[in-house]
Image (cartoon, rainbow, N blue to C red):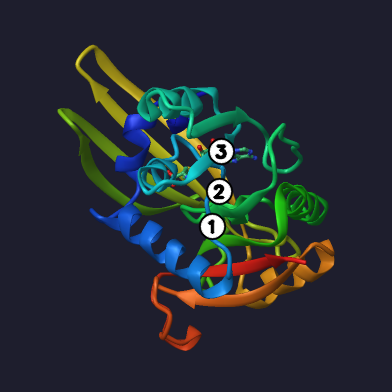
């Protein structure tokens, strides 16, 4: 089996169409959300599916304490290296579907990089929300970043979607993205396949990741929050704006849940 792109933490970011300055802009926006929706200072943050926690590093620079959870030991190791000493950014290897942490309750949790829809099954979704809810203080906020999901034509077989090149430092990358067939009764919006050929000087390595994407719109997130019994949805903001209505959303939206 081909390896996952998450074995190469410094390369995976180059495979996404991320614009420069995107993560600092997201962190500023999250801090604004916390100011709007919490009366108390927001200092202790849980970063869910944190990878090497680029958001956590910026929040720590702003005086926060951040705990990241992720299942990938390689991403966590990269996060620990980049975090340096000081202990204000800590990592635990956990599955997001079911976890507990030996930590005091958090003021807020974040789930960035449009990864939340990888939780496909209803039971796992509710279990995830309950676990995050248990980790938060009452009134704590959970901000979830989700791509706008337009209807996709159903494909009968694996179909190429996009193909491009990129670089990670001196290393050329060949990136191909595919769509996979999805059953009509599936909760999935799509199955995204990411293939990346990393042209290392010693020879190429091809990674492959299959990423299920559950159909997730504000109404379904609101329903999941209610069904979990631990959250209610208090806002859905589009494209890092407080004023743009959902109808005008171009790329993605952030759902804000409050721990009841
Ligand atoms: C696209 S990366 C985003 C990382 C980080 N939030 C960022 O913005 O750079 C997605 C991360 O989710 C993690 N992940 C995916 N499914 C997971 C699961 N079921 N449990 C724990 N981590 C998971 C992967 O290991 C990966 O590090």
Q: Quadrant of residue 72?
A: top right
Label 3 with label 1: CB-CB less than 8 Å = no
Judge by depth and name the residue closer to the eye, 166 or 168.
168
Residue beneath disc 3: 67
Asked whether residue 80 appears in the rendered view, the answer is: yes
* Element carrying mark 3: strand
Q: Quadrant of residue 47?
A: top right
Q: 114 above or below 46?
A: below
Q: Quadrant of the N terminus?
A: top right
From the viewer's perspective, is 166 left or right of 23?
left
- Decide which of tag 2 and tag 3 comes sooner along the chain: 2
Residue beneath disc 2: 45
Q: Position of residue 229 (x, y in %)?
A: 84, 64
Asked whether residue 181 appears in the rendered view, the answer is: no
Q: Position of residue 129 (x, y in %)?
A: 74, 55
Q: CA distance from mark 3 to mark 1?
A: 14 Å
Q: Residue furthest front?
A: 40
Q: CA distance from mark 1 to mark 2?
A: 8 Å
* Element carrying mark 1: loop
Label 1 with label 2: CB-CB less than 8 Å = yes
Q: Quadrant of the C terminus?
A: bottom right
Specify whether tag 1 is near ligand 1 (CB below 8 Å). Answer: no
Residue 42 is marked as 1
Which is more foreground, mark 1 or mark 2?
1
């Amino acid at each position: 089996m081909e390896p996952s792109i998450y074995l190469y933490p410094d390369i995976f970011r180059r495979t996404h169409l991320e614009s420069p300055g995107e993560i600092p802009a997201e962190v500023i926006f999250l801090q604004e959300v916390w100011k709007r929706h919490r009366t108390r200072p927001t200092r202790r943050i849980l970063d869910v599916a944190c990878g090497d926690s680029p958001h956590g590093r910026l929040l720590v620079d702003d005086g926060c304490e951040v705990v990241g959870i992720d299942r990938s030991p390689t991403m966590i190791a990269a996060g620990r290296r980049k975090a340096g000493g000081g202990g204000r950014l800590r990592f635990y290897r956990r599955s997001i579907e079911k976890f507990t942490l030996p930590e005091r309750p958090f003021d807020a949790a974040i789930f960035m990089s449009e990864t939340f829809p990888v939780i496909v099954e209803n039971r796992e979704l509710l279990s995830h929300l309950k676990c995050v809810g248990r980790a938060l203080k009452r009134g704590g906020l959970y901000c979830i970043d989700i791509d706008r999901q337009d209807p996709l034509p159903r494909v009968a077989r694996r179909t190429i979607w996009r193909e491009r090149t990129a670089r990670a430092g001196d290393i050329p990358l060949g990136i191909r993205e595919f769509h996979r067939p999805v059953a009509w009764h599936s909760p999935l919006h799509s199955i995204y396949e990411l293939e990346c050929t990393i042209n290392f000087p010693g020879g190429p390595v091809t990674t492959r990741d299959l990423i299920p994407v559950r159909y997730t719109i504000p109404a379904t997130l609101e329903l999941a929050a209610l069904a979990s019994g631990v959250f209610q949805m208090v806002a859905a903001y589009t494209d890092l704006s407080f004023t743009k209505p959902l109808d005008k959303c171009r790329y993605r939206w952030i759902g804000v849940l409050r721990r009841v």
